[in-house]
């Protein structure tokens, strides 16, 4: 077998200008393996991989990875922040009003900003944040039965 051209997680961190630590590698892998995880789920995933790490250290690593663009933070109104590894494609989210489940929705238009404001007030708009709200299948079934 020849070496895969896909960069390792550690190489990606280095490429983003970040110091490589076991905790950061574990965190990035946890976020990518997960599906819009909250901080506590991420912390337990990181602990499964590298042993004990404080919540504070998890927050610091998340902050660094988010700032470097390797992780995307989403914060639906009224719900705790979630993190995901799908970055840079301008996708949106659908959020369940009842249980807070989050799913990906491809961009409605294709490129950012997804929606064009009727009046931009002279701002150079580069992003439109779209969140679709509703009930997930589990919650809507629970409600009607
Ligand atoms: Zn739900
Ligand atoms: Zn997403």
Image (cartoon, rainbow, N blue to C red):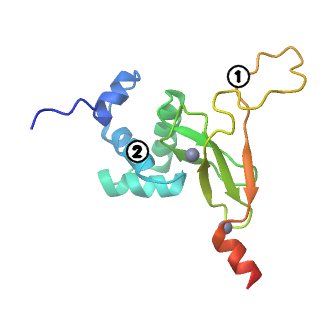
First in residue order: circle 1 vs circle 2: 2
Which residue is pictured at 66% across the width and 61% down the height?
Answer: 100
Tell me, for residue 31, which label it has, or none: none
Q: Nearer the viewer, residue 24 or 76?
A: 76
Q: Nearer the viewer, mark 1 or mark 2?
A: 1
In the rendered image, the residue lying farthest to the bottom is: 145
Q: Nearer the viewer, residue 18 or 56?
A: 18
Which residue is pictured at 70% across the width and 49% down the height?
Answer: 76
The residue wearing badge 2 is 27
Q: Please state, as top left, top right, bottom left or bottom right, where the C terminus lies in the image.
A: bottom right
Q: Position of residue 50 (x, y in %)?
A: 30, 50
Q: Nearer the viewer, residue 91 or 54?
A: 91
Q: Position of residue 2 (x, y in %)?
A: 11, 33
Q: Please state, as top left, top right, bottom left or bottom right, where the N terminus lies in the image.
A: top left
Which residue is pictured at 47% across the width and 41% down the height?
Answer: 85
* Number of callouts: 2
Q: Quadrant of residue 97?
A: bottom right
Mark 2 residue element: helix
Mark 1 residue element: loop
In the rendered image, the residue lying farthest to the left is: 1
Q: Position of residue 19 (x, y in %)?
A: 35, 27
**Left or right for 24, reference 101:** left
Q: Position of residue 79 (x, y in %)?
A: 70, 54
Q: Quadrant of residue 45?
A: bottom left
Which residue is pictured at 84% across the width and 27% down the height?
Answer: 117
Say whether marks 1 and 2 touch (CB < 8 Å): no
- Give the CA separation, mark 1 to mark 2: 29 Å
The residue wearing badge 1 is 126
Q: Quadrant of ligand 1?
A: bottom right
**Left or right for 144, reference 80:** right
Q: Note whether 48 is above or below 17 in the view shown.
A: below
Q: Note whether 34 is above or below 89 in the view shown.
A: below
């Amino acid at each position: 077998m020849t070496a895969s051209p896909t960069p390792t997680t550690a190489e990606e961190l280095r490429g983003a200008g970040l110091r490589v630590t076991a905790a950061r590698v574990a965190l990035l892998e946890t976020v990518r393996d997960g599906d819009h995880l909250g901080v506590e789920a991420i912390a337990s995933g990181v602990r499964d991989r590298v042993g004990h790490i404080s919540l504070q250290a998890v927050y610091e690593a998340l902050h660094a990875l988010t700032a470097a663009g390797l992780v995307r933070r989403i914060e639906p109104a009224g719900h705790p922040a979630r993190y995901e590894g799908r970055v840079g494609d301008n996708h949106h989210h659908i959020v369940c009003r009842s249980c807070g489940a989050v799913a990906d929705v491809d961009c409605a238009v294709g490129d950012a900003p997804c929606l064009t404001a009727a009046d931009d007030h002279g701002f150079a708009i580069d992003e439109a944040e779209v969140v679709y709200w509703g009930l997930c299948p589990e919650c809507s079934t629970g409600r009607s039965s």
